[in-house]
Image: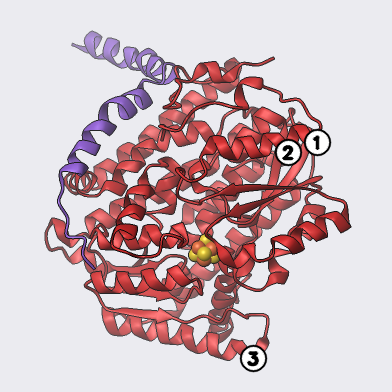
């Protein structure tokens, strides 16, 4: 168990470096999250009369 | 010749991979990215359910997912001490912004009634946070800036939706974009329902007055207008300014049931003064070739604490002191942090907020370092730490010298301060932004041109539409500046790939 935890903890560093270097965070947010959010926002009907 | 643009996807401007800054600086940048993730995790943990609800409720909130991208853009090309001061300041900005966003959601009555909602005094547009300093149980929270300016720094597509709403109901399309956006958010009912009361202000601009009225109609809490004198150099206006400050304090007392606490007030004023003194130190370094402060984040840091902290965010002073230590070491060692700089340029006037990293681009593409920009000269008033009337007047003076009040609508002589500041910061170039809907300042275009000729200064104008990239795109701004660099300055770009590229669809 301890060994598994240690391996898990140690793999976080290279994994995060990979995410950082290949800009995976921004790619996911821009190409993945952003279109979903826009779809949600576009589905709202608001009363925009003055 | 460098080919930096290859690193990005066309249109979106998203990087295929992050910047290689050499082993040491890339590893440092990676660590700071981890710190930023930590700040975002802390933010989400503050009230996960309400924050997620807010993200799906408010379109403007969606713009904030571009925060990490914005950090990358603003730190592009930085190395050594300059990279370090930029990250230190940026962490404080992130901490403050996420804190205010979280507070807006925690207190939002849309997501269920909560006592937390009454713990906030809402401040419209540029209203000064120092006015809430005497109420330790209350917090100042901005209205409009989170939904406009700050979000536009991260996502250029945030404001156009709201500006279109404003125009679609028949309001004037030539309004200042700042106010048009604020009005659009109000009409679309997209302000969080938070706060015990709202303090609006008397910006003299046509559209700003209009948006205040629209916001008042939509917002369901008591409001008051703080009428602060515009002609603040006339000492006879001081009595009026002081009376206004006292009225606002009484309004807060009446609407929240809290009592003004002098001891707490002066504690915050001391912090305010520390923030201002730190800024003066930054300037001394920025004037030298060994500065670790330059491009965009340092002026952003100033604008941030001027608008939101006013002494109430202790981590601002800590971050400033930490950055100053880095700068001091760089100066002592005569380290040239901006080694690509061929020219030093001051920027003035209302910038295109959708191109927040313009200075960074000018540095990387043309070797033009921006050690100072107009925002840095807002406020900077040392406030009395023991006399209440003097201190309240000091707050008014600090506010009256706020960026738009001082330079854009506060009298022609202040717009023209640019020449003195250019001299002090050893700039051989002056860039004045032609913000096409900010009418107050642009009446002086001819005078600025004449003075440039008289003073034999390199003056370049760059147009922008503040929040609306559809009118004058980032690439058009680049084109205007590049044209000047080749035609007048007779320079070759340091990186040809950065002169003309497509990032229209991007954040
Ligand atoms: S000073 Fe200019 S940018 Fe500011 S609110 Fe007025 S018109 Fe808009």
> Which chain is represented by purple in the image?
A
Where B304 sits versus B223, above or below? above
Q: Colour of chain B?
A: red
Q: Position of B89 compared to B45: left or right?
A: right
Q: Which residue is mark 1?
A: B489
**Which residue is at the front of the view, B314 or B231?**
B231
Chain-order first, disc 1 or disc 2:
2
User: Badge 2: few (under 14), some or many (20 or more) residues near its Cα, within 10 Å?
Assistant: some
Which of the two discs, 3 and 1, sits closer to the camera?
1
Question: Marks 1 and 2: CB-CB under 8 Å?
Answer: yes
Are the residues under marks 3 and 1 on the same chain?
yes
Query: Spatial distance from mark 1 to mark 2, Cα to Cα?
Result: 7 Å
**Which residue is at the front of the view, B105 or B137?**
B105
Residue drawn at x 78%, y 53% as measured from the top left: B422
User: Badge 1: few (under 14), some or many (20 or more) residues near its Cα, within 10 Å?
Assistant: few
Q: Image quadrant of residue B2?
A: top right
Q: Which residue is mark 3?
A: B236
Tag 1 subunit: B
Q: Which residue is mark 2?
A: B484
């Amino acid at each position: 168990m301890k060994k598994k935890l240690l391996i898990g903890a140690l793999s976080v560093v290279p994994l995060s470096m990979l995410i950082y270097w290949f800009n995976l965070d921004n790619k996911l947010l821009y190409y993945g999250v952003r279109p979903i959010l826009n779809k949600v926002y576009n589905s709202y009907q608001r009363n925009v009369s003055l | 010749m460098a080919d930096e643009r290859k690193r990005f996807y066309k249109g979106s401007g998203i990087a295929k991979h992050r910047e290689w800054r050499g082993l040491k600086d890339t590893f440092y940048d990676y660590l700071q990215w981890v710190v930023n993730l930590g700040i975002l995790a802390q933010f989400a943990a503050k009230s996960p359910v309400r924050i997620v609800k807010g993200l799906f409720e408010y379109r403007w909130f969606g713009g904030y997912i571009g925060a990490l991208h914005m950090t990358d853009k603003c730190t592009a090309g930085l190395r050594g001490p300059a990279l370090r001061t930029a990250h230190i300041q940026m962490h404080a900005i992130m901490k403050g912004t996420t804190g205010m966003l979280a507070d807006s959601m925690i207190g939002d009555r849309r997501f269920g009634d909560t006592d937390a909602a009454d713990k906030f005094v809402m401040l419209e547009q540029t209203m000064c946070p120092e006015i809430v300093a005497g109420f330790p149980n209350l917090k100042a929270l901005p209205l409009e800036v989170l939904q406009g300016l700050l979000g536009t720094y991260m996502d250029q597509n945030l404001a156009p939706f709201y500006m279109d709403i404003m125009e679609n109901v028949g309001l004037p399309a030539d309004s200042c974009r700042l106010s048009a956006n604020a009005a659009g958010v109000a009409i679309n009912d997209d302000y969080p329902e938070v706060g015990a009361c709202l303090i609006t202000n008397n910006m003299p601009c046509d559209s700003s007055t209009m948006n205040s009225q629209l916001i008042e109609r939509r917002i369901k809490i008591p409001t008051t207008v703080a009428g602060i004198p515009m002609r603040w150099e006339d000492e006879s206006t001081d009595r009026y300014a002081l009376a206004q400050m006292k009225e606002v304090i009484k309004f807060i007392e009446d609407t929240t049931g809290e009592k003004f606490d002098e001891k707490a007030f002066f504690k915050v004023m001391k912090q305010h003064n520390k923030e201002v003194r730190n800024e003066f130190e930054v300037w001394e370094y920025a004037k030298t070739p060994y500065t670790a402060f330059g491009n965009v984040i340092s002026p952003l840091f100033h604008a941030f604490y001027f608008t939101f902290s006013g002494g109430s965010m202790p981590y601002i002073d800590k971050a400033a002191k930490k950055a100053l230590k880095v700068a001091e070491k760089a100066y002592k060692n005569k380290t040239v942090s901006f080694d690509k700089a061929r020219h030093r340029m001051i920027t003035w006037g209302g910038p295109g907020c959708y191109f927040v990293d313009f200075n960074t681009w000018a540095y990387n593409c043309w070797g033009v370092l921006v050690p100072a920009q107009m925002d840095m000269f807002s406020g900077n008033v040392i406030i009395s730490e023991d006399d209440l009337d003097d201190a309240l007047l000091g707050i008014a003076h600090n506010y009256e010298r706020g960026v738009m009040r001082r330079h854009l609508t506060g009298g022609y002589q202040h717009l023209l301060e640019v020449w003195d500041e250019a001299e002090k910061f050893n700039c051989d170039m002056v860039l004045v932004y032609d913000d096409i809907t900010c009418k107050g300042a642009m009446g002086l275009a001819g005078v600025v041109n004449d003075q440039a000729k008289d003073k034999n200064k390199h003056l370049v104008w760059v147009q922008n539409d503040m929040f609306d990239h559809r009118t004058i795109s980032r690439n058009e701004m680049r084109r205007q500046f590049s044209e000047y660099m080749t035609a007048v300055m007779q320079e070759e770009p340091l990186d040809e790939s950065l002169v003309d590229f497509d990032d229209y669809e991007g954040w």
